[in-house]
Image: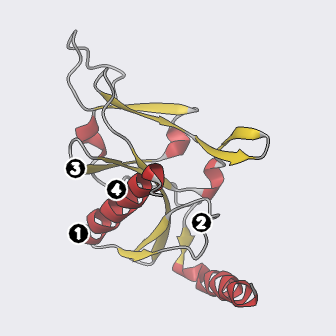
Amino acid sequence: MEHHTKNKDDLGVLKAQVDLCSKGYLILTPLSDLSPFDLVAYKNGEFIRIQVKYRSVNSKGFLFVRFSSSYSTSKGCCEKPVDKKEVDLYCVYCPDTDKCYYFDPKKFKSTVNIRINKTLNNQSEKINFAEDYLMIPTVNRNSLVSIENETQVSFCILRQVFFCLLA
């Protein structure tokens, strides 16, 4: 049986990889689905942890993104807030525009609306217009993993490989 949501998520990650690659980034992927991010982009000695979301334009003309993750247990569906310290950027792939939109989740509270269509009343203040999110934003350098921490990153990757081999 096909898992429709997972297919959309996979398509979003693939579209993000292609977009990032076209912007000159080397793409790294975690070995586990349990990672707090979907991929890592590397460029100019810096690693950026990116969480990817697939979102269609809603009836109000925007992409709605909630900073939480949902999962199922034997007790039902659960939702937990994203730890924004573990993610540097969000990338939202929109199939309606076939574009990726990038933003720092730390600049928003628990949700964000990225406006695709014009507002009905032509409001422009305090609106997150999609065209403003097409480029990779500058990320707080304190949260980035830099090449100076390469030994620590290499150790983490080796540790993941080791535990995968044990499983």
- The residues tagged by marks 4 and 3 sit, at their Cα atoms, a distance apart of 17 Å
Q: Is residue 102 above or below residue 1?
A: above
Image point 58% across, 84% down: which residue? 150
Whole-number angstrom distance, CA of label 2 to CA of label 1: 25 Å
Few, some or many C-alpha atoms within 10 Å of disc 1 (few <14, some 14-19, many ≥20)?
few
Quadrant of the image containing the C terminus: bottom right
Quarter residue 158 falls in: bottom right
- Which residue is label 2 attached to? 33
Q: Is residue 158 left or right of residue 52?
A: right
- Whether residues under marks 2 and 4 lie with C-beta atoms below 8 angstroms apart, the answer is no
Which residue carries the number 4 mark?
136
- Above or below: residue 139 compared with residue 123: below
**What numbered label is drawn on residue 22?**
1
Q: Is residue 14 above or below residue 65?
A: below
Q: Is residue 22 left or right of residue 29?
A: left
Distance, label 3 to label 2, CA atoms, is: 24 Å
